[in-house]
Image: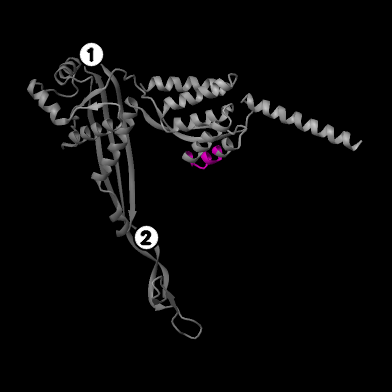
Amino acid sequence: MREKKDTGRAMRTRSMSSVVVACIALSGCAPTARVMIEKLDPPDADVSGISEIAVLPFGDDVTGSARGQVVAQHLAEVVANTGRYRVMKDDQMKSLLARAGIQFSYPPDASMVRRMGTALGVDALLYGELEKSQCDEESRAVEAREPVWTGDYVRDGQGNIMSDIRSTGESMPRKRFVKQLVEKNRLKRYAVLNLHVRMADAFLGNVICADTASESGSWEGTGSAEIAELPTCDMIFDLLLDRAIKKFVRKIAAHPVEEERILEYGIFHSTRLGVELAKNNLWDEAMEKWMQAIKAKPDDPAAYYDMGVGFERRGMFDLAYKAYQNALVRNTRSDRYIKTVARIQKLMKDLQ
């Protein structure tokens, strides 16, 4: 009788295992983990066909200084660093415009944009105005309760001065402090910057993309030591300008964003171990484990899918696409795989 019970229990266990394996094979109910990856998003604007750009000096009627040129130089650097465009050097641009006898005022109209585009031989022009750049300070005296040395030392019960041992091994008498109200100077610097940027088609003269980026911030310090550490107004200008420019450049070039991805544990030990490594941000080690799983269990789609996530995180979209396709070939009914292949195809097209 007992043998029959054991046999029945074993059959039920095998049956449940078969159900679990079948469930995993269909993907939707497979154990998963969620991770965050940094990936590239395509430009917000349609900049297809544009590869060569010239950045004009920016208009600056606000500060009455040469900051318009500073804006143009920093914008050119950020755009060039995206790797999406070839940016004409400033001295070459000025030389070509002078040779063509072109002088312009802000903002250049469509005919002037076309004329400059012909002289420079570029696909698009970047230009704009520094609409606002202001940095102000506010100083006031404040009272703060701080420890002040009494001029005496801490003593033990017998009246002997107690000492503390420093990390150097030196013995120092322990000073006695009391908290008192002291007057200190508090300085606050606050600033605002508005930058209007346009990208215009150098052949048609029309504006492809335009945006006004506004940035602001405040910095505060109490006491001479903290005040000395505050950024100067020039440093604050550079910081806000960098923020404003990078906000615009997201519209015309691919940019990194953080996005959630799902990893599948699969049915093989190396695949599951790879997921745990990725969850702890050990992606190189995770990729090695998934490669081991692919070699050992080439029919398990989870390892291919997870490998695709790893390649996508590295920006290797061709390899990610192949890995996702391999997962889909091994499980054609997985909604996750179908949607992922379609998504990576669209991303590759948008980034072209």
Q: Nearer the viewer, residue 338 or 231?
A: 338
The spot of residue 309 in percent (x, y) is 49, 31
Magenta range: 274-283
Q: Amino acid at mark 2?
A: Glu
Let me know if residue 263 appears in the view.
no
Image location of residue 255, percent across then percent down: 37, 30
The secondary element bearing badge 2 is classed as strand
* Residue at the spot 42% in from the left edge and 22% down from the top edge: 347
Say whether residue 192 is left or right of residue 35.
left
Rendered-image quadrant of the C terminus? top left
Q: Which residue is mark 1?
A: 204
Give the answer, above or below, for where 204 lies relative to 145.
Answer: above
Residue 276 among those drawn in magenta: yes
What type is the residue that disc 1 sits on?
A: Leu
Residue that badge 2 annotates: 143
Task: Verify whether residue 125 appears in magenta.
Answer: no
